[in-house]
Amino acid sequence: APATAPATETAAAPVVPAIAPIPASTDVHPFTIGELQAAALRDGGLETPNDNKTLAINKTKAEVDAVLTAAGLPTDKLSLSVQPLLVKTADKVLLFDTGAAALFGPTLGKLPATMATAGIDPASVTDIFITHAHGDHIGGLVTADGALAFPKAAVHISANEWAAMKANTQLAPIVTAITPKVVEFQPGSELIPGTVTAVDVKGHTPGHSAYTITSGEQSLLYIGDTAHHSVISVQHPDWTIAFDGDAPTAEASRKALIDSAAASGQRIFAVHFPFPGVGKFTKTGDVTVWTPE
């Protein structure tokens, strides 16, 4: 008779992940940050003419065309994506920015449908982190009838940004709706211990904030509107953007963040870069480029 195989220890039962993964689709790009489950959620996109009135307003069209052509992009228009970020922890559902809702027309405002595709109930969102108060980031906070789109979520906004929001009469309907839910923070504060920390990125708006999301040894930096275009903003951070409230400060902030992230290998989530907006800044010689995952 053949020799009996030596006894072995019974294999341990497989470990069931504590956080259920998010299903992928055309508009939902799931990924992980350490033990956290995350997903880019498509809200839509914007197109603007390449006429030096929005991006690179201190340059000529020929200069912009050369950069776009070298990157294999068309020179007649500039395209920006909009994708908020969802992160699931063991006991929380976090949403970073909320898309535009109806504020920018029919090419944006898909977040509610995208969340449904991802199996995320708006009422399950526990915390919302707003980078700044431009419409394509805060429009989705409320429904068409002015109710809270995420009725149970705390809304984290930097103190300076919240003050500016309250002073802007155009934002009064949103401000009124979210006031009971707002949690102000000082720039650079730790907001969820060990998981979410605000990063002060000055210049775009009075209280613009990026966010670092951490799990164990891994982290992701959600840059908000530090950079808008994955080629122009990255290769030429000093080219002026019309959306920046304090352009010289924003340009210095943009260059500093991109240089620091390229040097450290920091993983990035860019809300306006081509979907899904996850990648790194990498430097070759004197040129820094966006390298998507």
Image (cartoon, rainbow, N blue to C red):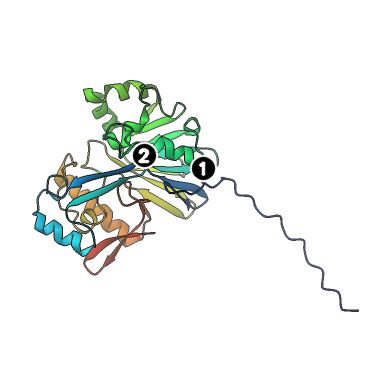
Left/right placement of residue 141 relative to residue 64 reads right
* Amino acid type, callout 1: Thr
Using the numbered discs, state the Cα–Cα distance from disc 2 to disc 1 in whole angstroms: 19 Å
Residue found 73% across the figure and 60% down from its top:
11
Residue found 32% across the figure and 38% down from its top:
108
- Element at badge 2? loop
- Element at badge 1? loop
* Amino acid type, callout 2: Ser
In the image, farthest residue toward the right: 1
User: Badge 2: few (under 14), some or many (20 or more) residues near its Cα, within 10 Å?
Assistant: some
Image quadrant of residue 10? bottom right
Residue 104 in the image, given as x and y percentages of width and height:
26, 35
Q: Which label's residue is closer to the chain start, 2 or 1?
A: 1
Residue found 33% across the figure and 42% down from its top:
44
User: Which of the labelled discs sits on residue 103, or is there none?
Assistant: none
The answer to whether residue 227 of the structure is visible from this angle is no
Compared with 163, 262 (above or below) is below
Q: Nearer the viewer, mark 2 or mark 1?
A: 1
Q: Which residue is mark 2?
A: 189
Residue found 37% across the figure and 33% down from its top:
156
Q: Nearer the viewer, residue 240 or 184?
A: 240
Q: Nearer the viewer, residue 130 or 118?
A: 118
Q: Nearer the viewer, residue 78 or 166?
A: 78
Compared with 33, 107 (above or below) is above
The answer to whether residue 112 of the structure is visible from this angle is yes
Residue 1 in the image, given as x and y percentages of width and height:
91, 79
User: Which of the labelled discs sits on residue 89, or is there none?
Assistant: 1
Compared with 279, 283 (above or below) is below
Left/right placement of residue 150 relative to residue 59 reads right
Residue 26 in the image, given as x and y percentages of width and height:
43, 49
User: Badge 1: few (under 14), some or many (20 or more) residues near its Cα, within 10 Å?
Assistant: some
Q: Nearer the viewer, residue 246 or 174?
A: 174
